[in-house]
Image: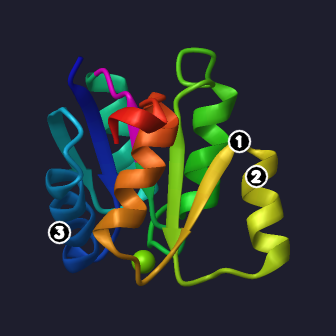
């Protein structure tokens, strides 16, 4: 089943990196939506079914943490997998994200890291990797 993905990052280059990694991941990706801040990300979620969210933290208008709080507060999205991609990798920060049931990937990343995170979320068995 193809995964519909939302990539939220105020950097166009940042979004392009994630999308490129998605395409290289070998995972069946369906629709790819993009948003440049948390507010736009929530608008995409209102309008489209999304299976997986990639989120930057530092963004104007609405940052990634506030967006994640709002996603988790909405019963329709509460269980949607979220992967945070950020240069902000302090332990406190990561713990706060884990408490919101989000995964953390440190920026910069390799396509393999994105692939492995997606496969973990989707539950691809080890032997078929
Ligand atoms: Mg940013």
The first of marks 3 and 2 along the sequence is 3
Q: Residue at x 58, y 35 (%)?
A: 71
Disc 1 + disc 3, Cβ < 8 Å: no
Disc 1 + disc 2, Cβ < 8 Å: yes
Disc 1 designates what residue? 101
Q: Secondary structure at mark 2?
A: helix
> Quarter of the image holding residue 87?
bottom right
For this orientation, the residue located farthest to the front is 127
Say whether residue 51 is magenta. yes
Q: Residue at x 41, y 84 (%)?
A: 108
Disc 2 designates what residue? 98
Q: Quadrant of ligand 1?
A: bottom left
Compared across the picture, whether 82 is left or right of 22 comes to right
- The answer as to whether callout 3 falls within 8 Å of ligand 1 is no
> Which of the labelled discs sits on residue 55, or is there none?
none
Q: Residues within 10 Å of mark 3 (few under 14, many from 20)?
A: some
User: Can you give x and y, in whole percent of width and height, for residue 81 in the image?
Assistant: 53, 36
Query: What is the C-alpha distance between the residues marked 3 and 2?
Result: 25 Å
The first of marks 1 and 3 along the sequence is 3
User: Can you give x and y, in whole percent of width and height, for residue 60 in the image?
Assistant: 44, 72
Q: Residue at x 24, y 52 (%)?
A: 25
Q: Residue at x 63, y 58 (%)?
A: 65
* Range of magenta residues: 49-53
Query: What is the C-alpha distance between the residues marked 1 and 3?
Result: 25 Å
Q: Secondary structure at mark 3?
A: helix
Disc 3 designates what residue? 16
Disc 3 + disc 2, Cβ < 8 Å: no
Q: Quadrant of the N terminus?
A: top left
> Quarter of the image holding residue 19?
bottom left
Q: Is residue 10 at least partly visible in the picture? A: yes
> Quarter of the image holding residue 127?
top left
């Amino acid at each position: 089943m193809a995964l519909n993905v939302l990539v939220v990052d105020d950097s166009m280059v940042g979004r392009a990196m994630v999308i490129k990694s998605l395409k290289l991941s070998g995972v069946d990706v369906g629709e790819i939506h993009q948003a440049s801040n948390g507010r736009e990300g929530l608008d995409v979620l209102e309008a489209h079914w999304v299976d997986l969210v990639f989120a930057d933290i530092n963004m104007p208008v609405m940052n990634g943490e506030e967006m994640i709080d709002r996603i988790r507060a909405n019963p329709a999205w509460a269980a949607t997998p979220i992967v945070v991609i950020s240069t902000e990798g302090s332990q406190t920060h990561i713990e706060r994200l884990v408490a919101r049931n989000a995964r953390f990937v440190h920026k910069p990343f390799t396509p393999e890291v994105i692939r492995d995170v997606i496969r973990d979320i989707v539950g691809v068995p080890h032997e078929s990797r």
